[in-house]
Image: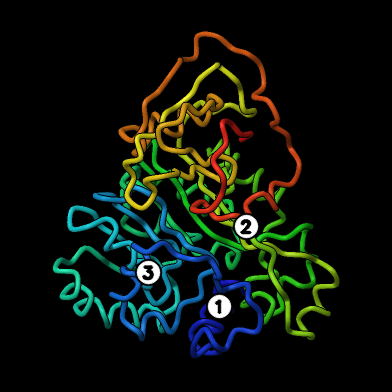
Amino acid sequence: MNLENSQDYYGKVLASSADLRTDACTTFAMPSADIIAALKNVHEDVKARYYGCGLVTPQALAGCHVLDLGSGSGQDVYLLAQLVGAEGSVTGVDATPEQLAVAREHQDWHAERFGYSNTRFLEGDIEKLGDLDLEPESFDVIVSNCVINLVADKEAVFRAAHRLLKPGGELYFSDVYSDRRVPEHLLSDPVLHGECLSGALYWGDFDRLAKAAGFADPRLVTDRPLGINDREVKAKLDGIEFVSATYRLFKLDGLEPQCEDYGQAVRYKGSVPGESRVFALDAHHMIEAGRTFPICGNSYRMLAETRFAKHFDFIGDFSKHYGVFPGCGTDAPFGHSDETPSTAPATGSACC
């Protein structure tokens, strides 16, 4: 039911984002000046059929090879194509023919606008990425924007993403999560499913599935509560609350279950485009340029063993262990990222 309903809802029921009945499949995040400028280079027909719930534009993408799971009409593909540049590439995968038709129709227009061609679109089910001709460990970054909630076998998506990422690569995606498991009888409701609600993962189940797929330490980047303004939809949900959240999951073998303290620190050089003052690793790590910033062993590796390494100086090693990093816990992760990375105060250290 999930794939068929997604194809019908996004291909036939919705003519544009204005037809949505909730704000789950929309984003209110304020893009940076660079992103705003890049969005101006995306065709209006592509933007009109955009249903993302976040900004899937991780930092330092120049030259990267990116895969977009559930690329829809192609807005994120064409946005990311400008960020990776002519030396990089962006591949979009989607299962809705009507959305793919819009994306493909404007490929030449965007290539002329950018001055290079670095995009491709594949028709396929993101639950069955193994059916596509995609090489293992061939992508630096995988993104997805409010799509994983629409599929039934979410674990298959996470496992495939892990297989397709290069070591040190990351899955950076926005999606909808619930504060409890959605009852079985709501899963087949076509409106609740199409509005990205009934397929939302309980955040605890997401944490478990991500770790089982090999992403040992999921990091929350941003989150916001969702408003359910449609009275009929709200009544069906019977008090379940939802958040839109962006996570980053790194493919790094050997990350530890807890945030462990080895007396390590980093100094940010201020060299990532768009984040010259503060680098946002996640909602708890706003790393001010030039400041010695204590971090746990996992965070150290997320910077030292990824594309971010050249932007930092690294202090310390793993030779001495000081226990769990102060302040770390296992409560629900949401509610800590009300301030955007550009406005959040930089702190000397923070829990992971």
Q: Which residue is mark 3?
A: 36
How many residues crowd around disc 3 within 10 Å: few (fewer than 14), some, or many (20 or more)?
few
Q: Which label sits in the foreground, 3 or 1?
A: 3
Relative to residue 40, is residue 296 depicted above or below?
above
* Residue 2 picture quarter: bottom right
Q: Which label sits in the foreground, 2 or 1?
A: 2
Q: How is the image coloured?
A: rainbow
The residue sitting at 76% across, 81% down in the picture is 233
Q: Which residue is mark 1?
A: 4
Q: Earlier in the sequence, mark 2 or mark 1?
A: 1
Q: Earlier in the sequence, mark 3 or mark 1?
A: 1
Relative to residue 48, is residue 207 depicted above or below?
above
Q: Which residue is mark 2?
A: 223
What is the CA distance from the residue labelled 2 to the residue labelled 3?
A: 20 Å
Specify the quadrant that holds the N terminus: bottom right
How many residues crowd around disc 2 within 10 Å: few (fewer than 14), some, or many (20 or more)?
many
What is the CA distance from the residue labelled 3 to the residue labelled 1?
A: 34 Å
